[in-house]
């Protein structure tokens, strides 16, 4: 009786299997790097009028008006958002730590809506050499304050400026992009203001 031989299963080169595995791993890594596996939560923008008071968790903030001061060489525009601020905590904060890319962000409301390249908070009439570096103390009453936002290019629309305010809270020692100054966003609510912008003489 003649034995029936079983057909042999074709086995590809071992390097081909490793190559396929490498492609899969690379694809997963690319998706992860682009945030494909992160849970994204859209911001909820809430429209506010100039003079409306909002609670930003560590401070109460009320933007009132804004003025633009172009540089004489046209390389930048400094926008001052005149406001009131009150530290509602028991902690003394540095002014700039609260504002710059955190609680308050200033945007060009025309054109592409670009954010200011930097922003600082000044309490009262003080303006330090290197920006807002004075202490922001807890108080019972709101204090006059200014947010100074610098735009690298001329504003495309000088009629209004957009101010977005978000509640923040102290971070727990983590250091990511939004936590570099010691604060993280407390929620996904963004208070959206559009303020009239007065154009002042170049400085």
Image: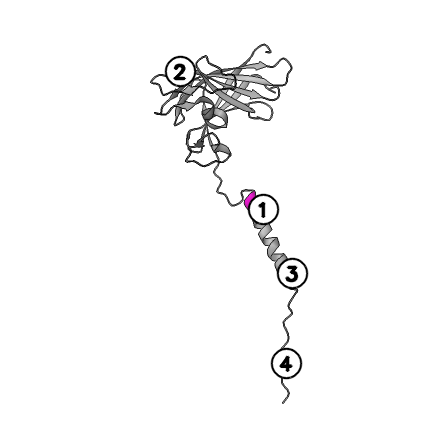
- Circle 1 residues within 10 Å: few <14, some 14–19, many ≥20: few
At horizontal 59% and vertical 57% (from top left) the residue drawn is: 21
Query: Which residue in the structure is indicated by mark 3?
Result: 16
User: How much space separates mark 4 and mark 1, taking CA atoms?
Assistant: 47 Å
The magenta segment is 29-33
Query: Which residue in the structure is indicated by mark 1?
Result: 30
User: How much space separates mark 4 and mark 2, taking CA atoms?
Assistant: 93 Å
User: How much space separates mark 1 and mark 3, taking CA atoms?
Assistant: 21 Å
Marks 1 and 3, the one that precedes in the sequence: 3
User: How much space separates mark 3 and mark 4, taking CA atoms?
Assistant: 28 Å
Secondary structure under badge 1? helix
Secondary structure under badge 3? helix
> Residue 132 at x, y = what percent?
48, 20
Would you say the residues marked 3 and 4 are in contact, meaning their CB atoms lie under 8 Å apart? no
- Provide the major secondary structure of the magenta segment: helix
User: How much space separates mark 1 and mark 2, taking CA atoms?
Assistant: 48 Å
Per the rendering, the mark at residue 5 is 4
Marks 4 and 1, the one that precedes in the sequence: 4
Of residues 197 and 154, the one drawn nearer to the viewer in this rendering: 154
At horizontal 56% and vertical 43% (from top left) the residue drawn is: 33
Query: Which residue in the structure is indicated by mark 2?
Result: 143
Would you say the residues marked 1 and 3 are in contact, meaning their CB atoms lie under 8 Å apart? no
Q: Quadrant of the C terminus?
A: top right
């Amino acid at each position: 009786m003649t034995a029936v031989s079983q057909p042999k299963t074709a086995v590809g080169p071992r390097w081909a299997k490793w190559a396929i595995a490498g492609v899969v791993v690379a694809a997963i890594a690319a998706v992860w790097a682009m945030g494909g596996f992160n849970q994204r939560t859209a911001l909820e923008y809430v429209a506010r009028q100039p003079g409306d008071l909002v609670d930003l968790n560590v401070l109460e903030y009320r933007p009132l008006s804004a003025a633009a001061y172009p540089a004489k060489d046209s390389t930048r525009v400094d926008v001052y958002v005149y406001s009131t601020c009150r530290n509602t905590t028991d902690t003394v904060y540095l002014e700039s730590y609260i504002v710059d890319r955190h609680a308050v962000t200033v945007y060009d409301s025309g054109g592409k809506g670009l954010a200011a390249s930097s922003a600082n908070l000044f309490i009262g009439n003080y303006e330090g050499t290197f920006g807002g570096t004075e202490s922001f103390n807890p108080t019972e009453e709101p204090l006059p304050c200014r947010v100074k936002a610098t735009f690298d290019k001329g504003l495309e629309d000088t009629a209004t400026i957009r101010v977005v305010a978000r509640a923040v809270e102290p971070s727990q020692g983590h250091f990511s992009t939004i936590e570099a100054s010691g604060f993280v966003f407390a929620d996904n609510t963004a208070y959206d203001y559009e303020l009239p912008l007065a154009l002042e003489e170049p400085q």
